[in-house]
Structure formats: C-alpha cells, structure tokens
C-alpha cells in the first residue's frame, strides 16, 4: 500500500502553482476591483459569447450557489446580464454587457504583458508541456468519475 502523503503533496503543489501564477495577476485584478472568480467568468463569457449557467459553473470551476452570488455582483457592476428563454424559464444564460466587453478588452493587454514575463522565465516549450500534462491529468480525473 502506498502512503497517501505522496498524493497529498501533488494537491498542495498544484495549489501552490496556482497561487504563484495568480500572484502575477491578482494585483491587476485588485486595481480594477475584480476578483479571480469574477475575472474567470468575464473571460469565459468574452471567449464564448452566451453561456448556460450550468456550463459556466463547470467551466469556471465555481460551485453553482457561489456562482449565483458572484453573478449578482457582476450584474450590479453592469458587467453581466442574465437571459431567460421564454420557452424554458428554468434555464439561465449569461453574456457580457457592453461595459463588460469593454473591461475585458482593456484588461487583456495587461494580462498578455504579464504572460510574456512568465513565458520569458519559463520558456514556451515548458509552458506547452505543462499545459499538455495538466490537460491529460484533468481528462484522466474526469474519465474516472
């Protein structure tokens, strides 16, 4: 039997890597008054257009009850709008408002600049390898549920 402490260190290492990455971006997010989770939602909506609430929760890795509160705050900031189809009131779709789209466009240049710093320190090849390995790991984890 293998000790579980080996596996827990992978979990901690992944969390530490995420925090290290976010340390590049969190100050910028703070400057514009947006949280990590809010930025994830804005980015996903900007990249995908209109998204179903359930799909957004899954893609953003945010629990549905938490997503509801975050969306309420984004609506108050006039960044996101909820859409309900007339034929199915149980479903909710989301999209960026023009204000949300403008914020995304303005902020992307700064994000790209930060990524350039990361790429220069880690190399494009290593980042591609890391991305491939993490995607493979995620697929294995999802397939085994």
Image (cartoon, rainbow, N blue to C red):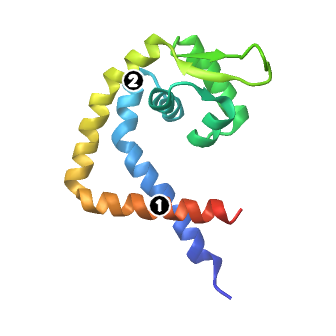
Q: How many marks?
A: 2
Q: Residue 126, how many percent across, how many down?
A: 29, 62
Question: Where is mark 1, residue-wise?
Answer: 134
In this rendering, position of residue 143 left or right of residue 38: right
Where residue 60 appears, as percent x and y from the top left, is 57, 39
- Please tell me which residue lies in front, 128 or 15: 128
Disc 2: CA contacts within 10 A as few (<14), some (14-19) or many (>=20): some
Q: Residue furthest bottom?
A: 1
Q: Is residue 24 left or right of residue 120?
A: right
The C terminus appears in which quarter of the rendering? bottom right
> At 44% across and 22% down in the image, what residue appears?
33
* Residue 43 location (% of width, % of height): 46, 31
**If you read the primary sequence from the N terminus, does the residue marked by circle 2 or circle 1 appear first?**
2
Graded by Cα atoms within 10 Å as few (under 14), some (14 to 19) or many (20 or more), the crowding at tag 1 reads few
The residue positioned 60% from the left and 75% from the top of the image is 5
Residue depicted at x 47% and y 30%: 39
Pick the front one: 17 or 93:
93
Q: Quadrant of residue 85?
A: top right
Q: Which residue is mark 2?
A: 104
Direction front: furthest residue: 87
Q: Is residue 92 above or below residue 65?
A: above
For the N terminus, give its image quadrant: bottom right
State the SS at label 2: helix
Cα gap from disc 2 to disc 1, whole angstroms: 26 Å
Q: From what the image shows, is residue 30 above or below residue 23? A: above
Q: Position of residue 68 (x, y in %)?
A: 69, 26
- Residue 35 vs residue 89: left or right? left
Q: Disc number at residue 6?
A: none
Outermost residue on the left side: it is 120
Give the structural element (helix, strand or loop) at label 1: helix
Looking at the image, residue 129 lies above or below residue 100: below
């Amino acid at each position: 039997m293998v000790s579980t402490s080996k596996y827990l260190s992978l979990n901690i290492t992944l969390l530490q890597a995420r925090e290290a990455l976010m340390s590049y971006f969190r100050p910028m997010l703070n400057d514009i008054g947006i949280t990590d989770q809010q930025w994830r939602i804005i980015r996903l909506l900007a990249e995908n257009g209109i998204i179903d609430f359930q799909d957004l929760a899954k893609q953003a890795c945010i629990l549905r009850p938490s997503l509801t509160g975050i969306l309420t705050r984004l609506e108050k900031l006039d960044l996101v709008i909820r859409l309900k189809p007339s034929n199915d009131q149980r479903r909710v779709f989301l999209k960026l408002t023009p204000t949300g789209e403008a914020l995304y466009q303005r902020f992307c240049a700064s994000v790209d600049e930060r990524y350039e710093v990361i790429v220069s320190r880690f190399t494009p090849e290593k980042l591609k390898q890391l991305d491939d390995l993490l995607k493979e790991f995620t697929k294995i984890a999802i397939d085994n549920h």
